Structures are given as structure tokens and as C-alpha cells.
Amino acid sequence: MTDTPLSTAPLLLILPLIGFAFTAAFGRRLGKRAHIVPLVAIAAVWVLAMGLAIPALLGDPALGGEGSSLTLFTWIASGDLIFNVGIHVDGLTGALLLVVTSVGALVHLYSVGYMSHDGSYWRFFAYLNLFMFSMLLLVLADNLLVVFAAWELVGLSSYLLIGFWYTKTAPGLAAKKAFITNRVGDVGFALGLMGLVVVFGSLDIHTVLAGVEAGALVGPAATVIALLIFCGAVGKSAQFPLHVWLPDAMEGPTPVSALIHAATMVNAGVYLVARMSPLFAASHDAMLIVAAIGIFTAIFAASIAFTQTDIKRVLAFSTLSQLGYMFAALGVGAWIPAIFHLITHGFFKGLLFLGSGSVIHAVNGEQEMTKMGGLWRKIPITYATMLIGTVAIAGLPPLAGFFSKDEILGEAFKFGYTWVWFVGMIVAAMTAFYMFRLMGLTFWGKSRVHDESHVHESPWTMTLPLIILAVPSIAIGAALGFPFADGVLVHALEPIFHPASEMLGHEHEAWTLFGIDGLLMLASVTVASIGTVVGVRLFRSDNNEFLGRVTKRLQPLYDGSRNRWYFDDLNDLVFVRFGRKVANALWWFDRRVVDGTVNGVATLTSSGGRGLRQIQTGRVQNYALGIAFGLVAIAAAYLVIAG
Amino acid sequence: MSMIAGHLEPYLVLSSLLFSIGAFGFLARRNAISMLMSIEVMLNAVNLAALAFGAFMPTLAGQGVAFALLIIAVAAAEATVGLAIVIAIYRNRKTPLVDEYDAMRQ
């Protein structure tokens, strides 16, 4: 065990856990210095994680390819069923580590500035470290039961952080909504795991995947188990129809939105499906459903993002939409582009969220874009970095989003899923449009800020993470994805996804500029450019007459989009109101029938006892008389029967 | 074995009569001592019946006597224990009348 390349890996889990425990225990007394221990812990985690992720991504013989495992201890041993806690690092883990620890460390730094005025400063950092521990456990674990535990732990930390300002009503409700909606998906996940235990007698990821690759799980059973596990992913990654919690989760502090609800936790679903890729590849139907839900969420959320006026909500729906892209990619079997998009999206969406936090900080906590505008002169660093993030997400070359999005669309087309490709193209144009709408309403045109004198650029702890995140937002696409179909990421992930791709019959082809690939790339750049041009032209200045006319003509569509296609109302109707009726009926049944039976038996017994007490006189001769009569009765009965 | 003249029935009639007297005494008398005496009467009625059966039914010859001897022994023991109890209660409650012994009802 000494020569394993993973000897430092347990520290990735131990350090944030220590940071959490220390801050939880002593943070209150440290006051404004509470961030030191968590920050140092995460910085150390980042260094260690890079030491694992970079070799893993660059195809180091020990960490690349199949990766390398380290069993820590046996968690549960029950008969033949043994659950070990272990760490596994390969290219996929490396990709996740890269995003999780980089964005995590920067968000910690950013929070030092952003949360500086908050009374519960220490509590925030304690939760953040708890989250980092849970997320790293999720990514590193080599057993699905441990993944499930970590899955719940990230859910818990998400709940705690969304409801961080628990004295206000909205965050409390949003936290509950997130937690409960996630439970719905997690039930499916848990059932899926039980199914895997039944089939394979183990939840060790390698055992399960080896079994699936050997063909031990096929047909409807594979579909059912894959879809049950996908349920968990739908909940955690906020895909339709369990997407409702993510927009509300924006009630949490902005660093949380950036870290958990954009860059890391919501990617857990994508990671899970990617990790279990052979299982999904074993069922064509499951893949189709994953692709359909993904691409539907992508266009559904993008259409809502069109009309939202809360800056963080727009980004939240954008996150939904981009996650939809990733699932669509997974569903068509484009595993590597999905993970590629996960990485690039983690960076540029983290950047955009932190930027939006910086904007909100600048305008005294205002989140409505209708009360912003013209901010670019006042907060130039935030503006510049957010512009980079916007161009990146819009998919314009040569920034990060272009590479990953183009690969998703290209592979969807080449694998024969033209409908996914077609909707994806529309979503790409929509994405560019609503992101430039966000930029226009926030930074361009005339200022609508209430009290302009207070607008100020954020402190260095907040702008530095923005600047640092801008670098991968520009460059990581090219760094990992160039040359096309032959880049670093392809080499790192190819061995991991090879079995699944083989099961699907997908072949790795060389990329051709003057062929289908070049055409597809040209098409995706074109739609992104169209979206960008339209967005910029409409929101460059305050020429809102044209917009007003369009809105008036499309009023029902506008209202629908603004009200999120009434999905929350539908949930309210079906689950809250109808649910209450059902609950009331059950309550009546409980009171009348269940309680009635129990109380009836009790009443019968007590009144019977009261009646029978009358014959207990306590006089010996009365009892003797009873015995005498009994004797006579028995003798008479004997005579009658025998005689 | 000596023969006894007559029939079985008169013995049984006498035995039932004695038993009825005993039972009536046990149920009707309030004095604990009288009740114990009534029990003795009933036991002896049973003894009589057992011996009569033993004498008139050849198949039961030995058993009737054995049974009677057993009952005599049990009756002696019962009288001893019963009297001891009665005396103990009497010391406690200062009355031999059983209808005053209603502690179980309380």
C-alpha cells in the first residue's frame, strides 16, 4: 500500500472533514478569522487533488487508463454482502476533481469577501467544508453504497446552505423544497442499488460494471435498474420533472449557488450516469429516455430563462439547460463530450455565478435586473470576467463552451440522433440570446440603479477568483479538447468509456475538418452567433419599443415562460392540494377506522370488566356457592351426555 | 373379606344425605369453625361412598379402602391447616364470622 499513487488521496477527505469539525466546534469564537482553517484546508486539498487529477488526465501509467484503487476499510460485512470503503482515481475522477477542487477553493476565497458582513460567518465556512468533504467522497468512492451516502451528504449540505439565512421564510422554504424534491429521486436511486445487489450481490463499482460488460444484466431488468439510478441523477441534477428545486435554491448565498448549484453538486447526476455508462449502454430504452429528458430539459429551461428578471434565476435556468445538454450527450452515447461539457460548464458557470454575486454585492443586494443597467463602468473587472463567461457559455470559438458544446452536438448528429442535434442547435442559439440579454440588462444601457453612489467594485478576495476563473473559461476547452477528437480528455476518458461505447457499437473516428465534422461545427458556430447578434442588438441599449411589441404579440408565450410554464403551479395542484385531499381522507380513515377499532376494543373490555366486577363479592361463601353450582352443572351435563 | 348384608343403594343415599348436609352447612353457616366442621362432614360422606363401592363392587375392592385412607389423611391435614388459618384470621380481625372477611373485595 505504500507504493500506491493514492497514498495522499485519503487526505482529500480528511482535510475538509477536519476543517468542518474544527470550524463547527470553535468557529464561533474565532469571529472574522473563522475562514482561515477551512481556507487552508481547501487550498491543501486543491494542491493534492491537482497532484492526482493532472497525472490522471495526462494518462499517467498509474492513474490513467483503468485508474487505480485503494481500499481503506470494510464498512459493512453482512454474510456474503461486503461493502468496502475505498478510493478510486481514474481519468473521470480526475476530471471531476479538477472542477470540484478548483471551483471549491476559489469559492472559499470569494466567500471571505462576500460573507464578510454576515453574522454567521463561521457557520458558512463550516458548511462549505462539509460540502467539500461530501462531494469529494462522492467522486472518489469506489462503492455505490458509499456514493449513495455521499449523495445524501451533499444533499444535506445543500439543504443547510440554501437555508443558510434560515430566519427568512423564502430560504427556509427553498431548502425544504430542494431536500424533498431530491428525496423523490433518491428513492429511485436506492431502489436501483437494491436491484444491483440482487443481481450482482455487490455494490463495488468495478464488480458491477464488469458484470454488466459480461452481459449479466440485459433486457427489461437492465432498463429498470438503469432508469431507477437515473431517477437519482434526475433529482440531483435537477432535470425535468424534478427541476423545480434548483431555481428556488438561488435563495442561498451566491457563493453556494456558484459552488453547489452550478459547478459541482448538480454535476453529480452526470457523473453517476457517466460512471455507470455500461449499465446504461446495456439498455437502449434507458439511453433514449436519458437523451429525451436531457434535451427536453435543455430547451424547456432555456425558454424560461428568456423572461426571468432575477439575475440568479436566469443563471439557474441556464444551469438546468446546460445540464440537460450533458444528459442528452450521455443519452446518445457521447460520454466524453458530456464530461467535457461538465468541466467547461463548471468553470464558466461558476464564474458567472460569482460574477452575479459581485454585481449583487455592488448594488446592495439587489437581484432584479430591471433595477440594474449601465454597470460596466462602475464594476469593470466583474463586467469583463462575466463577459468572458457569457461568450464561453454562448459557444463562440475559441472559448471553452464552444469546444464542449460543439462536440456534444456533433456526436449526437453522427450517432444518428438528429432530433437531439436539432433541438440542441435551437438551445445553443437560445443560450447565446438569453445570456446576452442578461449582460445587456445588467451592464449595458442606462442605469436603473436606485442609489448609484454606493455602487462599487468588490474587494480583491472576490475579484481574484473571478479573474482566475476567467482563465479556464477561456482556455480549458482548447487545452482539453484540441485537437478535435484527439485531445487530452479523449485520451484520458477513452479507456473508461470504451466498454460502454463498444456495447453501443459506437466507433471512434478521426475528426475531419473538410467533412461532416467541419460542417457541423460551422452550423453550431452559426447558430451561436445568430443568438449572440440578436441578443446584443436587442439589449445593447434601451430600445425597448421593439421588444415591447414582440412581447405583446406573444403575450401567452411570454406569460408562460415568465411563470416557468406553470410547472410549480401544477406541482402545487397535484401534490399539495390533491395530496392534502388524499391525506385528509387517510386521516379520516385513521381516526375513524383504525383508531375506532382500537378504542372500540378498549371500551368493550373495560365495560365488560366493570360488569363482571359485580360478581366478585369477596365473600368466601359466594365463591363456594359458585363452585357448588358448577359441580352440579358438570354432573348434570355428564349425566345428560353419558346417560 | 367379610360380606356385608344388604344393598349398595342405602349406603349411597346416606352418603348423599351427609354430603348435602355438609354442603348446606358450609354455604349457610357464618362461623368459620362451623364451616370447617361442614367440610369434615362432606369428606366423611365421600369416605362412606368410597367404602360402600369398595365393599359392593368386586372390581373396586382394594381401591375403595385405599381411597378412604387417603381421604382421612388429607382431611386431617386440611383440618390442621384450616384451623391454623382461621385462628390467624381471628387474631387479625377479632371475629370468626366469614362474611366480615371481605378484604379481597377492597
Image: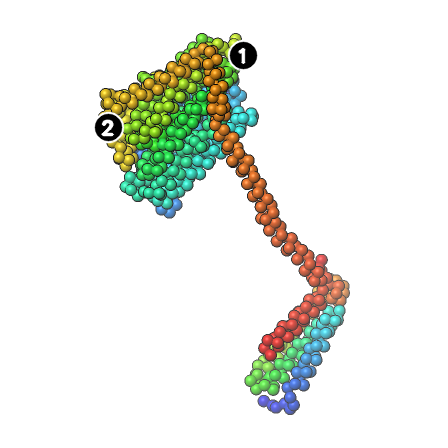
Which part of the image, by quadrant, shows the N terminus of chain A? top left
Q: Position of residue A235 (x, y in %)?
A: 43, 33
Which residue shows up at 56% across the image and 25% down it? Answer: A168
Q: Is residue A64 left or right of residue A383?
A: left
Question: On the image, numbered disc 1 is attached to which residue?
Answer: A450
Q: Is residue A267 left or right of residue B30?
A: left
> Residue A595 in the image: x percent, y percent?
60, 48
The residue wearing badge 2 is: A509
| Mark 2 surroundings: few (<14), some (14-19) or many (≥20) residues within 10 A | few
Residue A583: x %, y % from top left: 56, 40
Residue B4, above or below B94:
below
Give the amino acid at mark 1.
His
Above or below A564: residue A83:
below
Disc on res. A113: none
- Identity of the residue drawn at 52% across and 9% down: A452
Q: CA distance from mark 1 to mark 2?
A: 56 Å
- Quadrant of the drawing holding the C terminus of chain A: bottom right
Label 2: which secondary element: loop
Which label's residue is closer to the chain start, 1 or 2?
1
Taking depth in this image into account, of B76 and A579 the one nearest to the observer is A579
Q: Amino acid at mark 2?
A: Glu
